[in-house]
Image: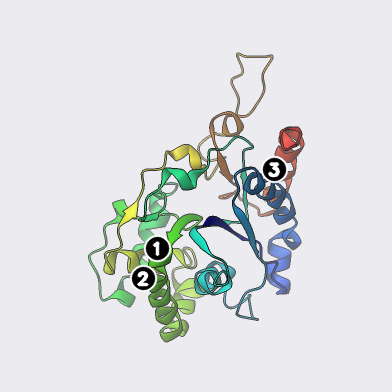
Amino acid sequence: MKNVLFWCGVKSDDSNMQEKHGRFEYLDIGRKSWEWWCEKNDVIFFPYEKASEADTGKHRVTWTRWFDVFDQVKDIDYNKIALIDGSTMVRWDTPNFFNLTDDRLTAFRSIENLRWLYEGISGYSLLFNNFDFDISKYISCGFQIFTKSHEKFLNKLTKFYYDNTDEILNLQYNLVKKGTDQPVYNYLLQINNIDVNIDLPRCFLLTHLNRFDWLSHNWQLKEDTTPFFIKYGYIWMYSGFPQRSHRYDLMKQTWDIVKKNYV
């Protein structure tokens, strides 16, 4: 059985989302790198381009991906699924991360902005009866690897969302405004005692490239101006920018630098 790369590339028809994300042109850039990597590593590239919810302005794709992933790949005989955000690029020589994981849910700790995380967890606490949340276990939802055994958990997440949609969306859009799916997803992970594998090296997911100065290079090596994130990271997530337009610009600049390697 092969593994599946579930690439989240839904281009919302909502006018506000289109304007906010620059018509999602950045998706076309990231997709090139992932299609090439999947072919190289004998992984099935599965583009998630149509969400089960028509109103993607209200029901964000960051939510519907969890509702749809197992249903959309049900006709494929697969071993594991890696769900990856469309705002990522993969370096040409990235090792096959499927071979480095076990049967636990694989994810990465989210440590980019601790104040943002704390305010999100605190803001959603009443929704979970003030559950004693361990913020040191907070994970990013941008890249995760599942087996079929995790479908049960995502079914619970789906039910919780639809049972509490109005309250969740009020927190999401009006009261807390700290993420969409991520606070709820993290609460339910801990409430359901899901064993999470965080053993993949950090280089497999670099986020907030500007915040951690990954965009810089070693100025002492005048003959080599390659940015740190390209030299030392395997998967680059273009997140945390002041303006969403920066995402397309930076991904386009990155592709112009590295595209010669995807041949």
185 relative to 53 in the view: left or right? left
Position in image of residue 233 (x %, y %)? 54, 35
Three-letter amino acid code at the position of disc 3: Leu
Instruction: Using the numbered discs, state the Cα–Cα distance from disc 1 to disc 2 in whole angstroms.
Output: 6 Å
Q: Earlier in the sequence, mark 3 or mark 2?
A: 2
Question: Which is more toward the observer, 77 or 252?
Answer: 77
Q: Nearer the viewer, mark 1 or mark 3?
A: 3
Which three-letter amino acid code belongs to the residue tagged 2?
A: Tyr
Quick one: quadrant of the C terminus? top right
Query: In this rendering, is residue 33 above or below 3?
Result: above
Return the residue found at the far front: 1
The x and y percentages for residue 32 are 72, 48
- On screen, 122 above or below 115? below
Decide which of 77, 117 is in the foreground and name it: 77
Name the residue tied to disc 3. 250
Q: Which amino acid type is shown beneath numbered disc 1? A: Gly
Instruction: Residue 132: give x, y in percent of width and height.
Output: 22, 65
Relative side of 27 to 170, left or right: right
Pointer 1 with pointer 2, Cβ within 8 A: yes
Q: Vertically, is 193 above or below 197?
A: below
**At numbered mark 2, what does the secondary structure look like: helix, strand or loop?**
loop
Q: Which mark is residue 16?
A: none
Instruction: From the viewer's side, name the closer residue of 137 and 107.
Output: 107
Q: Which residue is mark 2?
A: 124
Q: Mark 3 to mark 2: distance in Å? A: 33 Å
Q: Count numbered badges in the picture.
A: 3
**Res. 120 mark:** 1
